[in-house]
Amino acid sequence: MNNLLPVSGTSRIADRRAFLADSFCGFGAMALTALLRQSAASATESGPLAPRPPHFQARANSVIFLFMAGGPSHLETFDPKPLLDKLSGQPRPAEFAAAKYQQIKPGAKLLGVQRKFLRGGESGTPISDLFPHTARCMDDIAVIRSCYGDKVVHSAAQYELFSGRTVPGFPSMGSWVTYGLGTESDSLPAYLVLPDPDGALPAGLPMYDNGFLPSTYQPTMLRPGKTPVRNLGMPAGTSLRQRRKTIELIRNLNQINLDPGDDELRARIAAFELAFKMQTQAPEVFDLSHETQDTLDLYGVGKGPTDDYGRRCLLARRMVERGVRFTVVVSGGGGGNLQWDAHSDIEENHLRMAGETDQPVAGLLTDLKRRGLLDTTLVLWGGEFGRSPEAQGGKGRDHHNVGFSMWMAGGGVQGGQAIGATDAIGLRAIEDRYHFRDIHTTILHQMGLDQDELSYLHQGRKERLTLVHGSVIEQIL
């Protein structure tokens, strides 16, 4: 056994020590090769979604956008207007200039608010009695009462809310954030949308989309209901080894035809890899049975109107815990009155929509805070516009884009305050006005991203989320 087989046509004689030394060198080379292959594969798999450092010190690591689709009324929620209530049933006074509406007829009368306003938290920040649960969280919430946008129709306003543009084809804020920072999760998508079970919205999927950014930064749409992801478990009779070999075969076949600039195929390869990881690592993420009853009760899970939105808010918290960068939780879907789109009866609509979302939203804020996650999670609440001071059809309110409210919490935001103002009847933002671009700029800033540096060369122009017009809302930070 002291004689080794000829190598390269020559004969070698080796003792036991040389044999062991050569053998271990071979094993080391094999191990190194395996490690290098694993490292290369990992780099290919994470690739453009690998975590990247921010431009400067970040206050938030992730964003949860509680999207109230359809346009919640600022007047019934966060912006009390005693004068509007006093003038209810009368024509709009001449000193308040007219706004552009879709369906309000000339001569429409002002509509007062039937809601009472509470003093929320120790700060006493005003909030409607539509939100008794959220009222307890107002010390963590900064209300921005002076928001405005450029469009009064749903689709264009929804595009602007997400992408800063009023037409489709531009990247959403979720795609921009993941483009800038990548993801901290290797087994879940970086950017998730949890839609409402009632159906699609006027702007459709393009409002959430990656636009001209590479397909890697597109959102992953979960399914509504209790099964957000189908086929998450391993198929019966299929072993983990078999599934791994299938994925490797698909990847190798795709790599054969992969050109350096083929972002679509690269994104597809990454999607297959992510799907495999989700089957092996993520099923427990969507299983709420491990949550305590106290936590389920906090979100309203298992109770009539709050069950669905509560489940999705709880999932959003679980996503944040696992490094998901951007999550959208949609309230409102399908047509008209199934959203916060109260054309016919503001009271009926907002009582129902708030009844579905108030406890889950408060539960999310409370849960994030008690787990130490609120400091690093930026929560945004709002829709594509507000509602008109004038009545539509007697009891409803029309779309209203020139003055409305949104709020932020967590992620370095100073709660317990309301900033900005609309005029005395809630018609126009008049004090410290903030456009959607300012909301976007503030989100990027809290994530450690400079709005000017976060750019992408598209058709010869460096495109940005904010069109370089945005300003950080310093008052709430």
Image: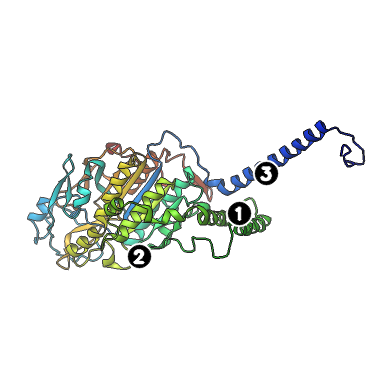
Mark whose residue sits in front, 2 or 3: 3
The residues tagged by marks 2 and 3 sit, at their Cα atoms, a distance apart of 46 Å
Residue type at mark 2?
Answer: Pro
Q: Report which residue position mark 2 lands on.
A: 197
The residues tagged by marks 3 and 1 sit, at their Cα atoms, a distance apart of 27 Å
* Residue 61 in the image: above or below residue 69: above
Q: Report which residue position mark 1 lands on.
A: 262
**SS class, disc 1:** loop
Residue in the foreground of this view, choosing between 319 and 181: 319
Residue in the foreground of this view, choosing between 272 and 157: 272
Q: Are marks 2 and 3 in contact (CB under 8 Å)?
A: no
**SS class, disc 3:** helix
Instruction: Give the mark nearer the N terminus: 3 vs 1.
Output: 3
Mark whose residue sits in front, 3 or 1: 3
Q: Report which residue position mark 3 lands on.
A: 34
Residue type at mark 3?
Answer: Ala
Left or right of 282, for residue 8: right
Residue in the foreground of this view, choosing between 244 and 459: 244
Identify the image quadrant of residue 350.
bottom left
Residue 405: percent from the left, percent from the top? 24, 50
Q: Is residue 230 visible?
A: yes
Instruction: Give the mark nearer the N terminus: 2 vs 1.
Output: 2
Residue type at mark 1?
Answer: Asp
Q: Residues within 10 Å of mark 3 (few under 14, many from 20)?
A: few
